Image (spheres, rainbow, N blue to C red):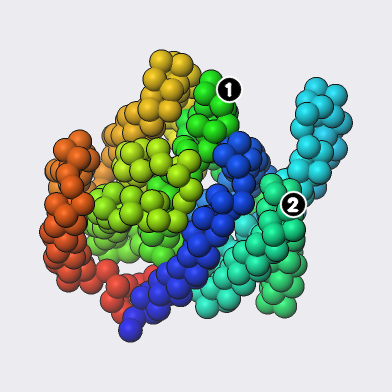
Amino acid sequence: MTHELKQMLYYGMGLFLMKGVSFLMLPVVANALSAEQFGQLDLWLSVLNIGSILVGFGLTEALYKQWGDSQPDQRNELISTATLQQAKIASYGFIVYLFASVAANHLLPQLNPVQLALASATLLVSALINIPLSWLRLQDSAGTFFLLTSGKALTQAAATFAFLHAGWGVTGILLSGFITSALLAIALILLQHRNIRWQWRAEKGRALVKYGWPLMCSGVLLFVAAGAERWILAATVGLAELAQYALAMQLAMIIAIACEPLTLWWFPKRFQMLKNADGEKRTARMGELVSHFCLWMVLLLSTVTPWLISELLPQRYSTVISILPWLALGMAFKQMSHLLNIGCYSGERPNIVFKINLVMAMIALTLFSAMSLWLGLQGVVITFVMLYALRALVFVRVSQGLLRLPYRFHLLIIHSLLVAATLFAGFTTGVMLLLCVGQTLAFFAWLLATTHELKLFSRPVKLALEAE
């Protein structure tokens, strides 16, 4: 087995264990909480998502870019500077929290201060996790990555189950997240301490921040484009309807999760791959490979999950069955916008990413607000699909203008239209299963042809990457 496949196997096993535990816990959480409490939990999760973007400050992507541009003897200094820079930003975040908590007590007296403290503490601790985990991926230490992240997932699931059984509700779920994040952060910092020499180079820190700043702003705008709709739904149709959307979105996230074994290996390496012989063609095929896989997953989810939802979740979540396929298609488009945009990151500062996300955020706020008032939950689902289809088209167009790669767009367009047409048709489960099998055979035939053409996972690729 090649080195790359071993790495992806570790990532795949880790994600299968982590997300498998997470999805096994989903019925437990859904049954333990009322629909309103589940909606409240989703709002806290959206706070954690936007907060992680702010404290992360785009340093992970900045690290990948500088790692690809640096020489091996410069990388110890780079990783130690990045870790210390992230800790510095987390300390600023703690100061912001102190002021924000005082303001929240006066302006939002109904807000649970314990839940606010737990969410904020989890954010600040999680900031110390990002760079060390990225370092493990850059070092091809997928085995260690697997042990640490899987251990966190299992511990968090056990703690969540215990706290829910004790009747702690949403507070217990947030507490389990904080405890396990703190334990993982301690383990990672100790591991780094044993393996790197701590160095601080101010100019490298500034360069990381300079590259990461527009990405952080872009991430905030991306959250507005797909994240703020939860707050709009809560305000327009209530927490019970938000719970339907939140649960369907968590299931649609299976598409992003299924891609991660490959992207966890590829994203840190893609700038290196681009520089190698035949690098542009290899990079294009990798993006195509995962994009086709995302579309294949849409049909698979639409076939399998209705039965699972009926069997495992309370009747109050029946609406999830009808909206999940469309959210899955929107999620596939979202992943494609990330996979086919490497040209937008090829410069010294990815300002174009910020500009695109700014425009998309303004469109999203307008459409989500209008469509939720007009059509309620269905309007938000329609907007989600249209928004990310548009976002994928814009990113591809701009990326190709900055760095033209030999993508085979006609195949992606045909595949997208076939999946969308299948969802519109509303076939029976038996027909959907036959279509899913046919698409599976076609996808694997394409995969075999592409890997044979470019030897994507062959030993020469590994040697070429190491030579850089």
Q: Give the label on residue 235, or none.
A: 1
Q: Are marks 1 and 2 in contact (CB under 8 Å)?
A: no
Which is nearer the eye, 349 or 170?
A: 170
Q: In the image, residue 189 lies at what x, y percent?
A: 72, 68
Residue at figure coordinates x 48%, y 41% from the top left: 316
Q: Is residue 185 visible?
A: no
The 10 Å Cα crowd at callout 1, few under 14, some 14 to 19, many 20 or more, is some
User: Depth-wise, is mark 1 or mark 2 nearer the camera?
Assistant: 2
| Of the image marks 1 and 2, the number of the one nearer the N terminus | 2
The 10 Å Cα crowd at callout 2, few under 14, some 14 to 19, many 20 or more, is some
Residue at figure coordinates x 21%, y 52% from the top left: 429
Query: In this rendering, is residue 277 above or below 412?
Result: below
User: Based on the displayed image, in which of its 4 quarters is residue 400 positioned?
Assistant: top left
Check disc 1 and report its element: helix, strand or loop: helix
The residue that disc 2 covers is: 168
Which is nearer the eye, 373 or 212?
A: 373
Q: In the image, residue 171 lies at what x, y percent?
A: 73, 48
Check disc 2 and report its element: helix, strand or loop: loop
Quadrant where the N terminus is found in the figure = bottom left
Residue at figure coordinates x 38%, y 24% from the top left: 379
Residue at figure coordinates x 32%, y 64% from the top left: 276
Direction bottom: furthest residue: 1
Q: Left or right of 355: which side holds 35?
A: right
Q: Left or right of 25: which side holds 451?
A: left
Amino acid at circle 2? Trp
Query: In this rendering, is residue 177 above or below 462?
Result: above
Amino acid at circle 1? Ala
